[in-house]
Image (spheres, helix red, strand yellow):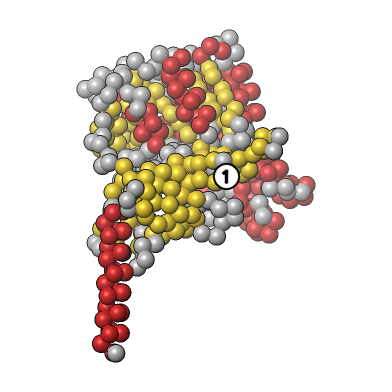
C-alpha cells in the first residue's frame, strides 16, 4: 500500500512538473494584447524570457509616460500552470491556451474586473532603425545619450529631446518620443543632462545657463554629423521648455515643440503653480497664505538667518497642513547660504524676449488640468508674444490632461445610458498635434 501511495505521489509530482515546464516553455517569446475593462481596452506588449533560471516578462506600454519605455517583472508559473506577475495596474493571474497560443485571465482584487488577454506573435523583426550611443563634449563634461536614426524613408529632420526638472537619468535608448517619431523617418537625439546617468558634471548645482550650454553643444554636434541634417529642432518637456528657449539665445533652432513647457517666467510660473495647487488640494485661506508666503521667500527674499528661520517654521506648517506636496526637494534650503542655490534661483529665467522675436515654427501643448504649468496664463502669454506672427505659433489645450499629459483613469458617461472605462494614458492629442505640426511646416521631408 505504501508503495502504491509513493507511486501516486511521484506520478502526480511528475505530472505537475511537466505542466509547469510546458507552460513556461510555451510562454517564452513575444506576446501582444490588452487590458480590458467594460467597453475599453489598453494595448500592452510582453516579451517573456528566462535568465539565470528565472522567468521574466518585459512589459511595454506606449500609452504611458513617453520617457519610460517599459519595465521588467519576475513571472511565476505554478504546478497547475497558473501564470502570475505584476503589472502597472496590479497583480494578474492568467492561464495558457497552448493550442491557440493565447493567455487569458484577470487582475486580482479589482472591482469591476480588469481582464487581460495576450496572443503570441512571431519573433519581432529586426529593427528598421539604428540607435547609436554618442558622447558629446560640453564645457569640460561628457554628455551621453543616443541618436535614433530611422532606415525607412529617412527625412532631413532631427529633433533634440530636452528633459525637464530634476536629476533623474532619462532612459535615452528607449525614449518613446524617439520610438514614435522614428516611424515618420525623423531622427531623434536624446541625452542625459549633466550629472545624470553616464553624463559627467554636477546636476544639483547646474544653472539654466549650464543646461542651455549643454543643449547648444548637442546642436553643434548634430550640425557636424555626416547625415547633414537640414532641419534641427527641439522638443522640450516641462522645464526643458525653458532650457531650449534659453539655448535659442546662443544658437538657432529651426523649430521648437514645447510639451507643458512654461512660456511665463520662472517666478510667475512658481507663483501660479502655488495658487492653482492650493485650489487643487482645497487649502483654506490661512493655509493658502502660508504657502504663498513661503513661495515669495523662496523666490525673492535676501538670504539671512531671519529668512531661513522663517522658511523652516513655514515648512513645519507645510507638513502639518499638507501643502509640502506642492514643493520639490530643491525648493528647501539646508542653510542660509543655500537659499541662493535653490532651483528657482539657479534657473531664474523669463522667455519673453526670445519668444517675442522667434520667427520660426513653435508648437506648445498644455494640459487642461495641469496646475504646475497652468494652460490659461501660458497660452495668453504666447498669444501676446506671437502677435502679428500667428502663423508661426500653435498653442493647444489638451482636454483632461495633467502635467505629464496623462489622463486619469475613470468612468466616462456619454449619456443615454452609455459609458465606458477610460484607462490611464498619455493623451493621444499629443502625438496627433506633433504630426500635424510637422506636416504643416513641411518638417517631414
Please give the name of the residue rendered at 40% of the width and 13% of the height, measured from the top-left corner.
442
Question: Residue 379 at what x, y percent from top left?
Answer: 61, 24
Above or below, 334 relative to 277: below
Please give the name of the residue rendered at 35% of the width and 27% of the height, measured from the top-left corner.
183
The residue lying furthest to the left in this view is 226
| Front in this rendered view, residue 336 or 23 | 23
Which quadrant: the N terminus?
bottom left
| Front in this rendered view, residue 19 or 92 | 19
Above or below, 411 relative to 415: below
| Front in this rendered view, residue 332 or 96 | 96
Please give the name of the residue rendered at 31% of the width and 42% of the height, measured from the top-left corner.
121
Which residue is under mark 1?
38
Which quadrant: the C terminus?
top left
Question: Residue 292 at what x, y percent from top left?
Answer: 69, 44
Question: Residue 43 at what x, y percent from top left?
Answer: 44, 41
Q: Residues within 10 Å of mark 1 (few under 14, many from 20)?
A: some
Per the image, label 1 sits on a secondary structure element best described as: loop
Left or right of 230 on screen, residue 408: right
Left or right of 107 on screen, residue 11: left
Please give the name of the residue rendered at 25% of the width and 87% of the height, measured from the top-left corner.
3
The residue lying furthest to the bottom in this view is 1
| Front in this rendered view, residue 262 or 36 | 36
- State which quadrant residue 418 falls in: top right
Left or right of 46 on screen, residue 417: right
Is residue 270 something one can see in this rendering? no
Above or below, 214 relative to 227: below
Question: Residue 381 at what x, y percent from top left?
Answer: 61, 23
How many badges with numbers are in the image?
1
Left or right of 65 on screen, residue 29: left
- State which quadrant residue 211 falls in: top left
The residue lying furthest to the top in this view is 388
Is residue 410 something one can see in this rendering? yes
Amino acid at each position: 500500500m505504501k508503495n502504491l501511495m509513493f507511486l501516486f505521489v511521484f506520478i502526480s509530482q511528475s505530472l505537475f512538473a511537466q505542466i509547469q515546464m510546458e507552460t513556461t516553455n510555451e510562454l517564452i517569446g513575444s506576446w501582444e494584447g490588452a487590458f480590458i475593462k467594460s467597453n475599453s481596452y489598453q494595448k500592452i506588449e510582453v516579451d517573456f524570457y528566462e535568465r539565470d533560471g528565472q522567468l521574466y516578462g518585459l512589459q511595454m506600454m506606449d500609452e504611458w509616460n513617453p520617457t519610460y519605455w517599459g519595465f521588467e517583472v519576475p513571472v511565476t508559473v505554478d504546478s497547475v500552470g497558473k501564470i502570475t506577475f505584476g503589472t502597472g495596474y496590479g497583480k494578474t493571474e492568467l492561464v495558457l491556451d497552448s493550442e491557440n497560443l493565447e493567455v487569458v485571465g484577470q487582475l486580482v482584487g479589482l472591482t469591476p474586473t480588469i481582464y487581460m488577454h495576450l496572443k503570441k506573435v512571431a519573433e519581432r523583426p529586426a529593427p528598421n532603425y539604428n540607435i547609436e550611443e554618442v558622447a558629446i563634449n560640453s564645457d569640460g563634461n561628457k554628455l551621453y545619450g543616443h541618436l535614433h536614426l530611422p532606415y525607412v524613408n529617412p527625412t532631413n529632420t532631427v529633433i533634440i529631446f530636452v528633459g525637464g526638472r530634476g536629476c533623474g537619468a532619462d532612459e535615452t535608448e528607449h525614449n518613446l518620443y524617439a520610438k514614435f517619431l522614428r516611424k515618420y523617418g525623423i531622427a531623434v537625439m536624446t541625452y542625459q543632462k549633466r550629472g545624470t546617468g553616464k553624463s559627467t558634471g554636477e546636476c544639483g548645482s547646474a544653472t539654466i545657463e549650464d543646461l542651455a550650454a549643454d543643449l547648444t553643444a548637442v546642436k553643434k554636434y548634430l550640425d557636424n554629423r555626416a547625415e547633414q541634417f537640414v532641419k534641427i529642432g527641439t522638443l522640450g518637456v516641462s522645464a526643458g521648455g525653458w532650457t531650449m528657449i534659453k539655448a535659442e539665445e546662443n544658437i538657432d533652432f529651426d523649430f521648437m515643440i514645447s510639451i507643458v513647457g512654461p512660456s511665463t517666467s520662472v517666478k510667475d510660473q512658481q507663483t501660479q503653480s502655488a495658487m492653482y495647487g492650493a485650489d487643487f488640494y482645497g487649502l483654506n485661506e490661512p493655509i493658502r497664505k502660508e504657502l504663498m508666503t513661503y513661495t515669495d521667500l523662496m523666490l525673492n527674499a535676501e538670504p539671512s538667518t531671519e529668512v531661513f528661520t522663517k522658511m523652516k517654521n513655514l515648512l513645519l506648517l507645510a507638513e502639518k497642513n499638507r501643502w509640502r506636496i506642492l514643493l520639490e526637494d530643491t525648493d528647501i534650503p539646508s542653510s542660509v547660504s543655500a537659499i541662493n542655490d535653490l532651483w528657482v534661483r539657479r534657473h531664474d529665467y523669463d522667455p519673453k524676449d526670445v519668444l517675442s522675436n522667434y520667427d520660426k515654427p513653435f508648437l506648445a501643448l498644455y494640459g487642461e488640468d495641469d496646475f504646475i504649468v497652468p494652460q490659461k496664463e501660458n497660452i495668453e502669454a504666447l498669444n501676446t508674444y506671437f502677435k502679428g506672427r500667428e502663423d508661426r505659433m500653435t498653442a493647444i489645450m489638451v482636454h483632461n490632461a495633467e502635467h505629464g499629459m496623462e489622463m486619469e483613469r475613470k468612468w466616462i458617461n456619454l449619456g443615454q445610458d452609455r459609458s465606458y472605462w477610460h484607462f490611464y494614458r498619455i493623451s493621444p492629442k499629443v502625438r496627433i498635434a506633433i504630426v500635424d505640426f510637422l506636416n504643416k511646416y513641411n518638417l517631414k521631408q
